[in-house]
Amino acid sequence: MIQSIKQNWFANVRGDLLAGIVVALALVPEAIAFSIIAGVDPKVGLYASFCIAVVIAFTGGRPGMISAATGAMALLMVTLVREHGLEYLLAATVLTGVLQIIAGYLKLGDLMRFVSRSVVTGFVNALAILIFMAQLPELTNVTWHVYAMTLAGLGIIYLFPYVPVIGRLLPSPLVCIVALTAVALIWGIDIRTVGDMGELPDTLPVFLWPDVPLNLETLLIILPYSIMLMVVGLLESMMTATIVDDLTDTKSDKNRECKGQGIANMVSGVFGGMAGCAMIGQSIINVKSGGRTRLSTLTAGVFLLILVVFLSDWLTVIPMAALVAVMIMVSIGTFSWDSVVNLKKHPLSTNIVMVVTVAVVVATHNLAIGVFVGVLLASLFFANKVGHYMTVKKSQRDDGTRVYTVTGQVFFTSSTKFMASFDFKEVVDKVVIDLTAAHFWDITAVESLDRVVIKLRREGAEVELLGLNEASATLVDRFGVHDDPKGVEKLMGGH
């Protein structure tokens, strides 16, 4: 127990504290921006980020991952807020948490194994592009000072780690923010700051149950939104956890993460915050700044609250250019540049899945739709590929018996090829179908076997099935009708 606490909390104290501070600074403008997207007061996003980050530090299944208010979730809230108001959003946030906890107990986190590597790569690349695109408003119609500050920030971020000794002690994004803030204040450079993003809250969040009627009508209003928020939130969190797993060479508990996200959103909803989920950008900032354990996530949440409530005077003077530089670094570091090089090496189907996932996510700004399309495409390509490996070889015994030897997987993709491999016009007394090296997966496969057996029998041949494995035999016995006269007539429809 003590060893586990030390490993999860205090194995990397200095790195976690510094990384948490960097993440907290990066969370502020994004939380405000996401609040504006959702159509609510900036404090709703800031309170949400604080609550979710603190709670997930204790309940999450992926140490070192940052969860807070996100743009993907904010986009889903717009209509609800516009038509019904903030209180219904808070109620939907609480219900979202309940649904996510249920998903955790149903072990829906295990579904991540169905997401192929090409879909994950597409998801990562799309997020990198979206993160970069989100910075463009801060770089359009501005003075040259903004470009100079942004370039200087990128220079600090990438060059500071090469400074002897101190370059390894301090995370370069934090140095970038502090240095550019000092330059802006000393030289009096008039550029956009965090304070220009919106008014910051001046009080701690308080417990407040959403002021909505507790009846069926309210449930019917918020349930569709809560379901969408649950799906997108868990999907983004699971994908981010997978990416952080790869970055840190450690494993995470996806089902615990589902429950943790649910608890965090429930707490956020009753403390005046909107729903949120894991953030790939901030999670990568955390990891690249040295954060590894739960302490970094807790530090980010706590320091965020300290910043916006007690140190707002200092926070408001931070140039947005400094934070833009940090986020550009995140987008560059997030994008899988190897995937571009590997376009020549990887199979066409893999490349198509990756590119389509990127295109759909960027076009819709909806991670769930993009990942769903990617998974669907990957599944179709896989089914098509496996279906091609099914073969039927034709031979003849000395006594004139025709033997068909089936090898491979018979299911909805390969069933047509399976049927086309038999010669129903050949005049033979006996046909043996050797299924020792075959496997029947679904009802479509069983139906194709039925049709083959029935057609051969109608041509006067005696048909014998050999070598069905136990699983296939169970399926054929349960759904096959070639030995049932009534079933034969129904299947063949009089043909």
Image (cartoon, helix red, strand yellow):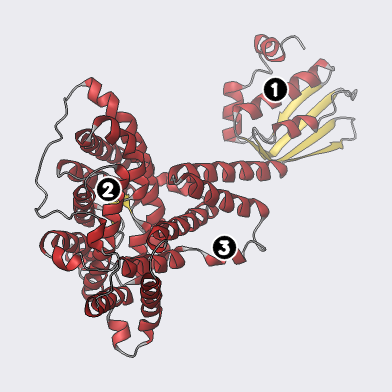
Q: Secondary structure at mark 3?
A: helix
From the image, state whether disc 1 or disc 2 is nearer to you: 2
Using the numbered discs, state the Cα–Cα distance from disc 3 to disc 1 in whole angstroms: 45 Å
Q: Residue 311: horizontal and vertical position, in percent?
A: 13, 65
Q: Residue at x 25, y 74 (%)?
A: 181
Q: Is residue 94 visible?
A: yes
Q: Amino acid at mark 2?
A: Ser
Label 2: few (<14), some or many (≥20) within 10 Å? many
Q: Which residue is mark 1?
A: 450
Q: Residue 229: horizontal and vertical position, in percent?
A: 33, 40
Using the numbered discs, state the Cα–Cα distance from disc 1 to disc 2 in whole angstroms: 59 Å
Q: Could you tell me if the residues under marks 1 and 2 are in contact, i.e. CB atoms within 8 Å?
A: no
Q: Which residue is mark 3?
A: 339
Q: Which residue is mark 2?
A: 35
Label 1: few (<14), some or many (≥20) within 10 Å? many
Q: Is residue 297 visible?
A: no
Left-right relation of 375 to 185: right
Using the numbered discs, state the Cα–Cα distance from disc 2 to disc 3 in whole angstroms: 33 Å
Q: Could you tell me if the residues under marks 3 and 1 are in contact, i.e. CB atoms within 8 Å?
A: no
On screen, 491 above or below 339?
A: above
Q: Residue 454: horizontal and vertical position, in percent?
A: 75, 19
Q: Amino acid at mark 3?
A: Ser
From the image, state whether disc 2 or disc 3 is nearer to you: 2
